Image (spheres, helix red, strand yellow):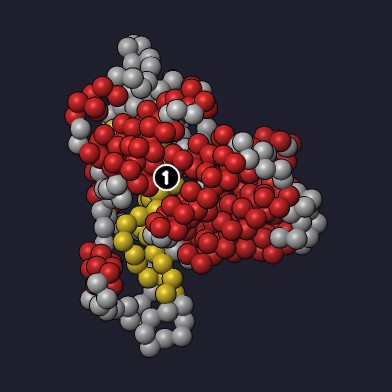
Amino acid sequence: MFALFLLLQAAAPDIVVTGERLVEEQAKCARGECTPLRDARATIALAEQRFRSGEYVHAKGLLAAAISRNKDKGADAPRAVAAIYEAMATVSLHEGDQDDYRRAVAGQDKTLRDNLPADDVAVQASATALGDMWIKLGRYRQAESTFRGIEEQALAEGQAYPAMMAGMKRVWLAGALGKMREARAMLDALEQRQIAQEPGFRTALRVVRLRLAVRAGDEAEITRLAGTIAADKDTPPILIWQPPYPSDAIAEANNNARAFGGGDVLPVRSSDVASIQWVDVGFWVRPDGRIEEAEILRGSRSPAWAPAILKQVEGRRYVAKANLGEEGAPGSYRIERVTRKNRYETPLGSNIRRRISAASFEVLDLTASEAATPPPGE
């Protein structure tokens, strides 16, 4: 959510404010008294606080106003403006407004591409954002076309990093859609590129191949590859496999009916409005890659699906750490925000667009130095 924001923090640590000072600082920016950089830092920080507290609509309003103030200032502060769009995209996705999500991703991409050179790290890092957006929206053909276009253009321009990133996204997407032969062929080709020999990409490609093996149920390949991958102790845990998230039965039934040209089994009524439901899950990833002590840290009022989320987290497997034999190594403590997925729709019999429940969940890693502290007594 806040990748570009973290870069802004690193660039200007003297502006970091919290609590009432943060509210006061952001209020100055709302009155137009801040530079785009200061506005981005104060507004995103306050929006993050509101988001973490479950106030998604408030956070979204703060960011929408900041975009309105700064959308014409991309030439002066492209990274700051893009960071506001990035935060807006994440909040909109969790709140359920897919139109705002799509506009924010497009705004972030355009701001960076129009105002920074193609080889800038921010441009390269955001190169696949549009494809990721199409995946989130369930438009897989559009995602594949986007990733392929990015990869081909990057190769033609000699940009190895974005070409590899887009290529790996294509492999992942093909595997997720069950096109295993195509996915393996693309992965074989990626491993022949010179950049594939860099340590980071070498590990990433092995993880991709391992995930394909897991999806295909190839136990021999899983065993072989698992022995070649060991994450460094200072890197975040690398997920190999996870069980599917629980789904909403009504939303799934409606989706299946639509896929076959029918109407909703249980249509949304003109008076229906879905609430925002969320939980924060804390858990240990032990050095051997297994999960322990998963628990709900906080959340909206008693969501009935919370126990199913704990089971999902407990069933995950991560790459084992390179220091597996180090005595007393606790592993890595993680915190994730899980939000029940919604979408906006205008029900029959109404002219008002509103949130309705959708299948599955949105997940965001909230782990940060100040947040990923185990509960007292750990």
Report if residue 195 is visible in the image: yes
Residue 359 in which image quadrant: bottom left
Q: Nearer the viewer, residue 284 or 74?
A: 74
Q: Is residue 234 left or right of residue 188?
A: right
Q: Residue at x 38, y 17 (%)?
A: 322
Expressed as whole percent of the image width and height from the top left, the position of residue 40 reads 68, 50
Marks counted in the figure total 1
The C terminus - image quarter: top left
Expressed as whole percent of the image width and height from the top left, the position of residue 239 reads 35, 34
Name the residue furthest front.
156
Expressed as whole percent of the image width and height from the top left, the position of residue 250 reads 24, 68
Check the image and report above or below for 155 versus 52. Answer: above
Q: Is residue 337 left or right of residue 317?
A: right
Answer few, some or many: residues within 10 Å of disc 1's Cα (few below 14, many 20 plus, some between 14 and 19): many
Disc 1 element: helix
Dot 1 corresponds to which residue? 170
Q: Residue at x 31, y 50 (%)?
A: 177
Check the image and report above or below for 193 versus 128. Answer: above
